[in-house]
Image: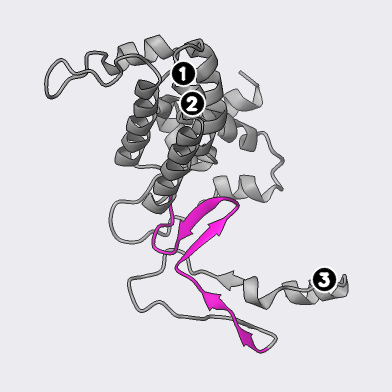
Amino acid sequence: MLDQVFTRFGLDINVQKTESMILNYPKKEYPESIVSLRDTALNNVEKFKYLGAFIRCDQPNTGDAEINYRIQMAMSKFVEMSNLLQNIKINLRTRITFFNSFVRSRLIYSCQNWNLGVNQLERLNVTYRNFLRRMIRGGFSHVDDYHYRINNEKLHNICGTDELSIFIKKQQVNYSKHVIRMPQSRSLKMLMFNSDKYTERGRPSKTLLEQVVENNTTTQDMLCNQVMMRK
């Protein structure tokens, strides 16, 4: 159908660059191809990079592949800018501004619609704190084998920052409010309020809206009413 529409407007789908993926695929033999275009079988891949984010067929939520990629991207940028970010002759708040703009932005890219577990959030928090410790004097000095001389709370006070998980939750709240205010006809809003309860066996994962409601200790109806009244 896409190919037919594109052809009408003089466009052409590149068969060599087009791939497919089955999301949330059961643990069976993964098919190499499920669709063909102009008599050419398209590759059916297990992982795919879409708009800068890594998606895996067996990780329908925000998976470890995406978190690992975010951490690697942030680390690479921090190393690239280490002469600036770790230069103690430059005011710390100035360096934090650069750090948030160039490093944190890569670490939490597209975080507004993430669906993370507790362990994934903690990994991001630890990575973020390790960056901050590299930017201050004695950031990794130990009192003993298990405790830093500068604890996490004092670290954030020195840097004027919060835990990364707090910032991520704020972004998710703002994004959810933005979607709630959309017209009812918008597909993004339809997806957020989708009532399909089909899940695989095991503990069901929470949707973005459920996470926001839980983090704000409110109900879905109260949140929607507050958003529509812009409170």
Query: In this figure, which residue is indicated by the disc labeled 2?
Result: 83
Query: Does residue 60 belong to the magenta stretch?
Result: yes
Q: Residue at x 55, y 23 (%)?
A: 98
Q: Amino acid at mark 2?
A: Asn
User: Does label 1 or label 3 sit earlier along the sequence?
Assistant: 3
Q: Amino acid at mark 1?
A: Asn
Query: Does residue 77 belong to the magenta stretch?
Result: no
Label 2 – label 1 distance at C-alpha: 6 Å
Q: Nearer the viewer, mark 1 or mark 3?
A: 1
Marks 2/1 in contact by CB < 8 Å: the verdict is: yes
Q: Residue at x 42, y 27 (%)?
A: 164
Q: Nearer the viewer, residue 139 or 47?
A: 139
Label 1 – label 3 distance at C-alpha: 51 Å
Total numbered badges shown on the rendered structure = 3
The secondary element bearing badge 1 is classed as: loop
Marks 2/3 in contact by CB < 8 Å: the verdict is: no
Q: Nearer the viewer, mark 2 or mark 3?
A: 2
Name, please, the residue furthest toward the right.
9
Q: Describe residue 46's horizontal placement relative to residue 28 as left or right.
A: right
Query: In this figure, which residue is indicated by the disc labeled 1?
Result: 87
Point out residue 45 in the picture as x, y percentages from the top left corner. Answer: 49, 71
71 above or below 130?
below
